[in-house]
Amino acid sequence: MTTTTTSFRTPAPRSARPRVEGDWLLVPAPQPHRPVRLFCFPHAGGDATAYTPLARALAPVAEVWALRPPARGGRSRHPMPPDFDALVAAVTEALTPHLTGGGGGRFAFYGQSFGALLAYEVARALPADRRPELVVVAGAPSPAEWEERETGNLDAAELLRLTGLEELVRADPDLVELALGAIRTDLAVSATYRHRPHAPIGSALHAVAGAGDPMLATTDLSAWAAHTRGAFGHRVLPGGHLLATVDRPGPVDLLTSLLTRRQATDISSTTPKEH
């Protein structure tokens, strides 16, 4: 007898059109069965649409909700908050009504580069009982090291090159100027970040870097361990500074493994033991 198995990574239905939730959030590939919500935070100069390939690749394991930063894309007329603390407060307020999530209220954060720092600080700003079960930070030094990183003197054009996005926009001068403008905006906000000693969060934390990242060559990912009381892991993956972009989905296997492993752990911990 022949048996047929179905992969759990079934593509999102073609009829599932992207939708916007308020000003701050884009759901690129809505999932009708309400899996865990994965809130994704873009890199400096990035927009929510960068996570469209990831959203499609993760279906139906997770439903991606991508952050729509101001001063770019569909929010080009919306001003960026004046400093990093104000940005954290605005994002926290915008996300809070949506943190019930699917899959029994499960949700997690993923951020890369500037977005990794923002994801962590938003998680920390939430009440302890409303924090994500998992925070995945990619391509970023730990908060304690952020102010000392060697990118402080980079201009927007150099950052565009180092992130590997220059090739995507160089054919269109208008796109280049839009990208540089968004990067300048985010660099200005990033420069206002000040790390303050604090109690580590209870969420699980996983730090990731691309093996070919020119901006994290000397960064010790294990430094992130000091910022959580939960499970911690770190990994170097193939890729450059940005793992998820408009033309590649990023760490799909890693995110799938982390999210499904945590679901299995949650189920086993609530299943009555036989005696």
Image (cartoon, helix red, strand yellow):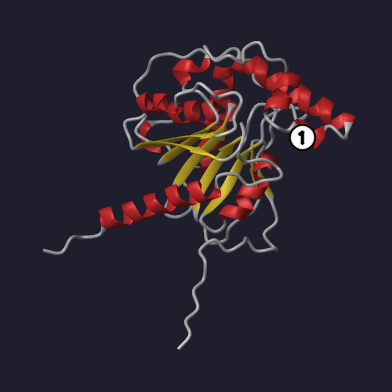
Left or right: 122 as drawn, with respect to 12: left
Q: Position of residue 2 (x, y in %)?
A: 48, 85
Q: Name the amino acid, label 1.
A: Gly
Q: Look at 20% across and 60% down and name the residue there.
A: 272
* Residue 4 drawn at (x, y percent): 50, 78
Give the residue at the far left of this rendering: 275
Q: Is residue 228 shown to the viewer in this render?
A: yes
Q: 220 or 196, which is in the foreground?
A: 220
Q: Quadrant of the N terminus?
A: bottom left
Q: Quadrant of the C terminus?
A: bottom left
Number of numbered labels in the structure image:
1
Mark 1 surroundings: few (<14), some (14-19) or many (≥20) residues within 10 A: some
Quarter where residue 30 is shown: bottom right
| Of the pair 114 and 20, the residue shown nearer to us | 114
Q: In the figure, 19 relative to 189: above or below?
A: below
Q: Let me know if residue 79 appears in the view.
A: no
User: Disc 1 on helix, strand or loop?
Assistant: helix
Give the vertical position of 16 relative to 214 (above or below). Answer: below
User: Residue 143 appears at what percent x and percent y?
Assistant: 47, 20
Question: On screen, 272 above or below 184?
Answer: below
**x and y percent of residue 48 in the render?**
67, 39
Q: Residue at x 67, y 29 (%)?
A: 163
Q: Determine which residue is flagged by label 1.
A: 73
Drawn side of residue 79 relative to residue 147, left or right: right
* Residue situated in front as seen by the camera: 18 or 188: 188
Q: Residue furthest bottom?
A: 1
| Residue in view at x 66 percent, y 49 percent | 53
Residue drawn where x is 71% and y is 45% of the image: 247
